[in-house]
Image: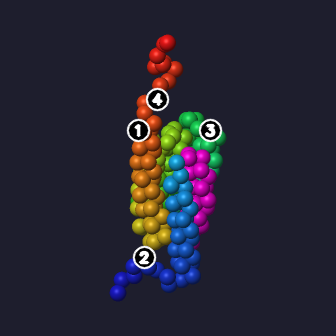
Amino acid sequence: MPKIPFLDTSTPTAVAGQCVGLVALVLCLAAFASRSDERLLAVLILANVAFTLQYVLFGAWVGAGISALVILRIVFARRFKGSVAAMAGIIAANVAIAAFAWRGPGDLLPLGAGISGAVAMFMARGITMRVMLIVATLCWIGTNALVGSLGAMMADIAILATNLVTIVRLVSERTRSGPRIGPATKKRV
């Protein structure tokens, strides 16, 4: 009978990897349910510590390296929002990690997640940032399917769903608050 990777509990390391993926699930739900960009980013730091450990336990080195880099990216993106130079540095680091730990075409997925996440975090906010993070999430779902992590698969599918619900909530709030009148559109009295 063939081994089902998502149900692999044959070693303590596999069990630990699955458990750490479940911890990441809880943290990601808390992050993406937040309508606050600051809280989203802070909780994502903790979730990426869990994801990094999980990828180490599964021996997925590109995923581990890029997940660890995501922590630095979140900190830099909060400090240097809009900086093309900082974004380019993070993207270059993603490429370097992938080149160093490359095992095959499957490593394009975490690389794609790292690059799309960098563009989202440095160059976007609110709804736009969350839409761009969906691309990164889809890459991580593929990565988790390849490494066989049930916890991380559930986390990323939950991230995707929660992120979509949050986007709908933000759009709804924007619609309810009506059009914004900026300095250029104010009527003279």
The first of marks 2 and 1 along the sequence is 2
The kind of secondary structure element at disc 1 is helix
Label 2 to label 1, Cα distance in Å? 45 Å
Type of the residue with mark 3:
Phe
Residue extending furthest front?
Answer: 189
Type of the residue with mark 1:
Thr
The kind of secondary structure element at disc 2 is helix
The N terminus sits in image quarter:
bottom left
Indicate the position of residue 154 as horizontal and vertical percent values: 45, 67
The first of marks 3 and 1 along the sequence is 3
- Left or right, 1 with reference to 187: left
Label 2 to label 4, Cα distance in Å? 51 Å
- Left or right, 112 with reference to 79: left
Indicate the position of residue 42 as horizontal and vertical percent values: 62, 52
Type of the residue with mark 4:
Arg
Type of the residue with mark 2:
Pro
Residue where numbered disc 3 is placed: 80
The first of marks 3 and 4 along the sequence is 3
The dot on residue 180 is 4
Label 3 to label 2, Cα distance in Å? 40 Å
- State which mark lies toward you, 2 or 4: 4
The first of marks 4 and 1 along the sequence is 1
The dot on residue 175 is 1
Label 3 to label 4, Cα distance in Å? 27 Å
At horizontal 48% and vertical 64% (from top left) the residue drawn is: 155
The dot on residue 5 is 2
- Up the image or down, 142 lies above or below 189; here it is below
Residue 52 appears in which quarter of the rendering? bottom right
Give the residues drawn in magenta, as a range: 36-60
Mark 1 nearby-residue class (10 Å; few <14, some 14–19, many ≥20): few
